[in-house]
Amino acid sequence: MSEQTEEQRPSPSRRALIGWGGAGLALGAAAAGGVAAAVGTSDRTEPAAESGGAVPFHGRHQAGIATAVQDRLHFAAFDVLTDDRAELVALLKEWTKAAAAMTAGRPVGEGAVGGLAEAPPDDTGEALGLKPSRLTLTVGFGPGLFEDAKGRDRFGLRKHRPKALVDLPKFPGDNLDAARSGGDLCVQACADDPQVAVHAIRNLARIGMGNVAIRWSQLGFGKTSSTTPDAQTPRNMMGFKDGTANIAGTDTAGLDKHVWVSEKDGPDWLVGGSYLVARRIRMHIETWDRASLKEQEDVFGRDKAEGAPQGKQREHDQPNLKAMLPTAHVRLAHPDSNGGIKILRRGYSFTDGTDGLGRLDAGLFFIAYQRDVRDGFVPLQQRLAAHDALNEYIQHVGSALFAIPPGVRDADDWWGRALLS
Amino acid sequence: MRALRSSVVTAVAAAAALAAVAGCAEKSDGKGSDAIKVTASDDACEVSAKSFPAGHVNLSVDNEGSKVTEVYLYAPGDRIVAERENIGPKLHASITAEVKPGTYEIACKPGMKGDGIRQKVTATGKGATAKRDPRLDAAVAAYRTYVQEQADESMPLVKKFTDAIEKGDLKAAKKAYAPSRVGWERTEPVAESFGDIDPKVDLREDGLAKGQKWTGWHRLEKSLWHDGKITAADKELAKQLTKDLEDWRKRVGTADLTPTGMANGAKELLDEVQTGKVTGEEERYSHTDLVDFEGNVEGAEKAYTLLRPVVVENDKALATDLDKRFAAVKKLLDGYREGDGFVSYDTVGKTDRKKLSDTVNSLAEPLSKLAAAVVVTK
């Protein structure tokens, strides 16, 4: 577990760093030392937002999964434009380098200022002076990397496609927009400062120009899940706490059982990785707001004030599922109703302005990590899509599935090395 | 188009300086003791001094040949510092200019044709600019020729367009509209550097300031496609357009071009594609955006090709990438050809527009590094 710890170390601000000029190497060494020191003294349950510190980039697993959930999200899905495997590899190496810098609070490349007057700066600069803000960057590989829409095996990866990287079935009620779905690559950027998250995606997209293009992206302004035990679950846009039985970032056994791909699961290149399901779930906010409190609580199977399961007192009390309506969201989604299925949720609320009909374009950008979607999201969603009382107030409008490679081990390692070398 | 942008050149100032020079050419006797004598003949161009102090310079020209001649003072890259046309046989003329320290060329052009007979001269003094790679000077000179050619070759196409309007021939005017713009689109950043011409000829309706009169191509575009008729006012606008573009043709050679300016101009042409053409905003009535698109790309590629020998030396990977990206953009555009032009842009769907946008980005991003590759040796 020590590899994915996210304890904070005091981190120099980006502004302080750029002043150092050519001291990048010395700084990198200092940062590495900081990580090593931090591992031994971690207090994983302490939220790190106040320190603005950095989450270690290197480790057995990618950061941004078991990491204590940050406040903000910028998620981007990319189409790979090139058919050249060498270019794909070069891109992933360059992304890894930039990600290691940005998560440590350093600018990309030669920085945002002080370079050649005739050249555009390597770094776009909007994160100058901001702290690392617990930025994590998590990369995933979509089905299109292994076989594109035309059935071509562009990169010779078809044989390495994990069996669990399925094409998700159509669930009842889905109204998926192709322009908000799928993607060959994804990057999940989470940070406590929204500008830091946006800066990261923007710079990775810029580095990738020519080889990848953003297919769709999603901003999340508020976390709706917690991977920190004891912490209160944040409320979603419906005003409810949901997913309170989440897997904690400290629950090594739970993570191994439900989140990380094991050697037994394979394929080898994915061991220590995971699978990410992203769903853009639009909420019919206006009609929801007209529902009576009783109906709202019945739909979820929870009390709105505390988030306690119906008939219980506290959020984390063991629910009595039978006390809820058969169509209640908690009852249908609970592991006890699903043969023990658990997924690690990391979703964010979004509001993308209005929809032209005077309604908020708002909802939940659902993100879940699991060891195998065929035993995780797929059966769970089949059940929810068929029976959940909440369906009257929500619609799934975007969907994507990605295989999440294991962590980048050290400075010589890069995202996808085990798959592509 | 963008109304005021002059990162490429400072031609407004250059043009003003030139006007002043032309003004005093008539009056000066040109026989002061500091004057540099230029003796032009049908096969020679003698100068009395090949080195002189920077500052106020007076060229005292005598045409001793049998042909009408003209004399130019060129800065590196064939930028016209001062010139005098129509100097008849046995006539005297005087040309004055303010010159900075550096190297120049004096050219006599018997018969007023060609590159002329040239003499290298030096203006001495403090602050002389570092000697530039002669290949870059050659690139700038060639680009200047290109820019002038584009303007020269545009005029008959412009006339075809404006003639059709003046005749009230809607069909012919529509047909001639897009081709009349190609030369302009290829060299737009240079054209835009003349801040006063661009707003007269290439302004879009949304770019109008309060109280500003809308003239130029896009006003006529709206009449032809949106209104579907040619009014008396349009005929006047057509006359004005010819006049304004003739002004462009005359002045474009005086633009203060530099290697980095060329490189940035190439990038700006791609910016034009990305912000105006890919969106379909530029030609919102005629939907001939892809014609402009191609013109922008061709102009950018011309500048790049001329700079390429130096870029290959300084940043080989960039040159390789740019070669590939230009080819990809052109190949994608080829897929939209129809007849001697392109398909109407309103038939290009969202998915295809995104592909165009992605491909333009793929070129524009490395192209933004061209200027640095011209000035810095890696």
Image (cartoon, coloured by chain):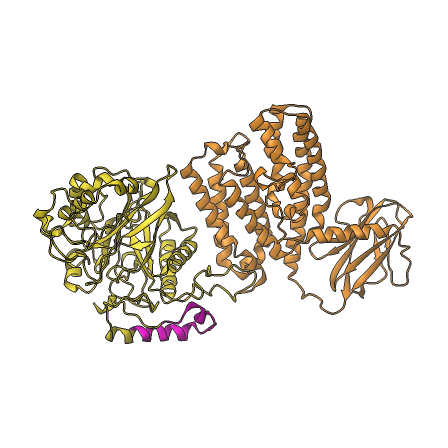
Chain colours: A yellow, B orange
Give the residue at x 36% y 67%.
A104
Image coordinates for residue B244, horizontal then vertical, percent: 70, 39
Q: Which residues are magenta?
A: A11-35
Is A14 magenta? The answer is: yes
Say if B134 sits above or below B297 in the image.
below
Residue A170 is at least partly visible in this image: no
Give the residue at x 29% y 63%.
A408
Q: Is residue A189 left or right of residue B288?
A: left
Give the position of the N terminus of chain B as an image quadrant. top right
Is A248 or B157 nearer to us in this picture?
Answer: A248
Give the residue at x 26% y 40%.
A290
Image coordinates for residue B283, horizontal then vertical, percent: 55, 36
Residue A200 is at least partly visible in this image: yes
Is A232 magenta? The answer is: no
Is A373 or A105 nearer to us in this picture?
Answer: A105
Q: Is residue A10 left or right of residue B15?
A: left
Image coordinates for residue A214, horizontal then vertical, percent: 38, 48
Quarter occupied by residue A40: bottom left
Q: Is residue B184 left or right of residue A146?
A: right
Is B268 or A286 nearer to us in this picture?
Answer: A286
Q: Is residue A245 left or right of residue B378?
A: left
Is A315 or A90 nearer to us in this picture?
Answer: A315
Quarter occupied by residue A171: top left
Q: Main secondary structure of the magenta part?
A: helix
Figure label count: 0
Image coordinates for residue B68, horizontal then vertical, percent: 85, 44
